[in-house]
Image (spheres, rainbow, N blue to C red):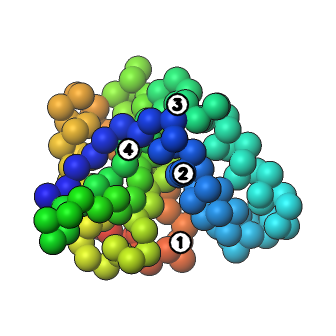
Amino acid sequence: MLSLKECTGSEIGEYCTIFVNEYKMDLIRNHQFSQLEAHQKANATFNTSFPDNQPAKNNSLLRITKILSDVPCQVGYMWLLYYPEEQSVFIMDFYISPEYRNKKIGHEAMNNVIAMLEEKQMATLKLRVEPDNQAAIGLYK
């Protein structure tokens, strides 16, 4: 069983470290940013959307928990940005911890998010994937 739960302040702070490191590496690898520029941009992006570890308007950070061997394990996060006037949601970030990848957890989380968004009457789910991210491309197909 997999569950999605809105993150609180301390959980948002834990995610910040993951997001900044992952996004920084993406900016360096795919957009030729320097280490410093990438770190500054990643921090600014996060702090604009989660000032003081609280979600800014229309931002939502979900903690993904999966029961494995009867033990709840925090396996990842999904950051959503809502556009209520368009009835759409953009996936800003979808992170599954490395030790839980390639176990179909991403597929299960996506199915849960889609069901949750349908209940909220959101008509469209959008995202962007780097062309070299074959794992993500496979997930979203």
- Asked whether, in this view, residue 138 is left or right of residue 34, the answer is left
Element assignment for label 3: loop
Q: Which residue is mark 3?
A: 55
Element assignment for label 1: loop
- In the figure, residue 123 lies in which quadrant? top left
65 and 40: which is toward the camera? 65
Marks 2 and 3, how far apart at CA: 14 Å
**In the rendered image of this protein, does residue 58 appear above or below residue 60?**
above
- In the figure, residue 121 lies in which quadrant? top left
At x 52%, y 31%, the residue is 55
Q: Earlier along the polypeptide chain: callout 2 or callout 3?
A: 2
Element assignment for label 2: helix
Q: What crowding class fits label 2: few (fewer than 14 Cα within 10 Å), some (14-19), or many (20 or more)?
A: few
Q: Which residue is mark 1?
A: 131
Q: Which residue is mark 2?
A: 14
Q: Earlier along the polypeptide chain: callout 4 or callout 3?
A: 3
Q: What crowding class fits label 4: few (fewer than 14 Cα within 10 Å), some (14-19), or many (20 or more)?
A: many
Mark 3: amino acid: Pro
Could one spot residue 36 in this view of the protein?
Answer: yes
Mark 3 and mark 4 in contact (Cβ < 8 Å)?
no
Q: How many numbered marks are there?
A: 4
Q: Which residue is mark 4?
A: 62
In this rendering, which labeled residue sits more in front, label 2 or label 4?
Answer: 2
Quadrant placement of the C terminus: bottom left
Could one spot residue 107 in this view of the protein?
Answer: no
In the rendered image, the residue lying farthest to the front is 71
27 and 76: which is toward the camera? 76
At x 61%, y 56%, the residue is 17
Marks 1 and 2, how far apart at CA: 28 Å
Mark 1: amino acid: Pro
